[in-house]
Image (cartoon, helix red, strand yellow):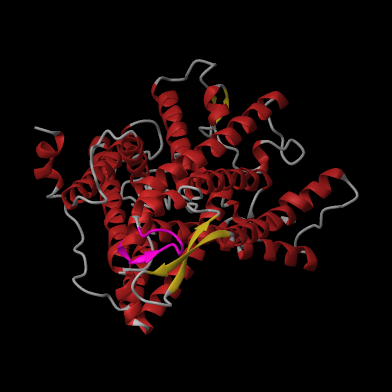
Amino acid sequence: MSWKDTAEPLLTRMPSVARPEGHVPFKRKLGWTAGVLVLFFFLTNINIYGLGTGGSNAFGRFSSILASQQGSILQLGIGPIVTASIVLQLLGGADLLGLDTQNNPRDQVLYQGLQKLLVLVMIVLTGFPMVFAADFLPAESVLGLSTGIVKWLMFAQIFAGGVLILYMDEVISKWGVGSGIGLFIVAGVSQSLVGGIIGFPQISGNWGFIPSWVGMALGYRELPSVLTGSGMIDLLFNQGMIIPLITTVLIFVIVVYAESVRVEIPLSHARVKGARGRFPVKLIYASVLPMILVRALQMNIQFLGRLLNSQLGGLPAWLGTYNDNGQAVSGLFYYLAPIQSPQDWAWFVHNVSAETWQIMIRIGVDLTFMLLGGAIFAVFWVETTDMGPEATAQQIQNSGMQIPGFRQSPGVLEKVLARYIPQVTVIGGALVGLLAVMANMMGTLGNVTGTGLLLTVSITYKLYEEIAEEQLMEMHPMMRQMFG
């Protein structure tokens, strides 16, 4: 008896959102999407009952790309979903699961059930140590209850929030437009980005770009002197935020341009004469979403380091030394920590305690991690989401299309696609990793991190394409039947 036979009763009974029986009108899809988005913002403003003060942020600046709101019931954000996806991608890439999700309906159901089960496990493995270990979410006695009971109450709220965001993502995937994970990332990053542009200290705690310059023009803020080195640095990076503005705009332009760079493979319909089309192999073929997996892996490594440091009362010096804010300042965990802002490496912007050679090693490790991780996870993403040459060739074959001048055969299509897809996937994944590191090093408006900005621009661009496609299908129902 295989593991599938043993696990099938459990995996097939995992609660799921019912699929629509027929076509969902575009307006209804927008309604579901908007409703879930409003619910997401509502939940991020519900604080955990019993939460104390003084705890450190478990995810730090990873919070925006994980759609996590510190202290709310959505404390975990999409972290458990992403971590479960990493585990499944690694198991699937090594062919340890033995599931044929492309052709076998039973294996598709098992895979979806296994994914939900893993997400629930990751919610427990991530939320439990936050409450019961270290000081990530310190509890205080309320209503005369003991601290232990309050902690269990807090954990129950965090668990409920993790389950809610899991099914909110599924609702959008089946009834809405785009992906729930992508929508939550855009929502979280956009909040920080808008704050970085128009935020006031009284509201967001920091000066936004526009209020800062208005304040300097009207005399509310002192204009840094450009005649001194420190004044110029302050104008470019800190108070003036000129470099973060340039970086933000450049990332936006580069990602939009990269999304338009593609190799187009001509197609023609085998039975409908004159019906032609093109299959685009974009430069960022795997999209920017695999970068979430890379950053989530880094986040889990840092989370493990902080947890071990807290529970063991300190780590050996070669593993890591931590400051009062829970950040590694030396050792292995310091070198594995990603560069998140100019303050992490630029001694001319901020007083960096580390030695120059330590900073250079950290930059090299982060750059290598992102380049290799971006390429590897992009390949995993393509293969597990049926975007590889074999799966794509079968999809084109099923739609009745073929490449002009070639025999109508999935094998022939696969050979042609294999000339482009693997190479473009690796190059695009490495490029996204490089852009993320460079954006973090130069800084962005709202401190959204380069990865968050890349994800937001790319997801928004793809959401625009999906909305345009949905409108086209709504206007021409025959096209919906042709493309399935």
Q: Which quadrant of the rendered structure holds the N terminus? A: top left
**In screen coordinates, is 386 left or right of 365?**
left
Residue 300, image x and y in percent? 42, 35
* Residue ranking furthest to the bottom: 475
User: Image quarter for residue 297?
Assistant: top left
Q: Is residue 307 magenta?
A: no
| Residue located at (15% from left, 45% from top) | 11
Residue 229, image x and y in percent? 85, 44
Could you say which is closer to the camera, residue 191 or residue 253? 253
Could you say which is closer to the camera, residue 129 or residue 89? 89
User: Image quarter for residue 149?
Assistant: top left
Q: Which quadrant of the rendered structure holds the C terminus? A: bottom left
* Residue ranking furthest to the right: 227
User: Compared with residue 68, is residue 221 higher up or lower down, i.e. above or below?
Assistant: below
**In screen coordinates, is 243 left or right of 186?**
right
Q: Is residue 78 visible?
A: yes
Residue 165, image x and y in percent? 31, 55
User: Compared with residue 461, is residue 231 higher up or lower down, i.e. above or below?
Assistant: above
Task: Please report the bounds of the magenta region as a residue range.
Answer: 398-408
User: Compared with residue 272, is residue 140 higher up or lower down, i.e. above or below?
Assistant: above
| Residue located at (35% from left, 37% from top) | 93
Residue 130, image x and y in percent? 36, 37
| Residue located at (27% from left, 75% from top) | 24
Characterize the magenta stretch by its predominant secondary structure: loop
Q: Is residue 47 visible?
A: no
Q: Is residue 400 magenta?
A: yes
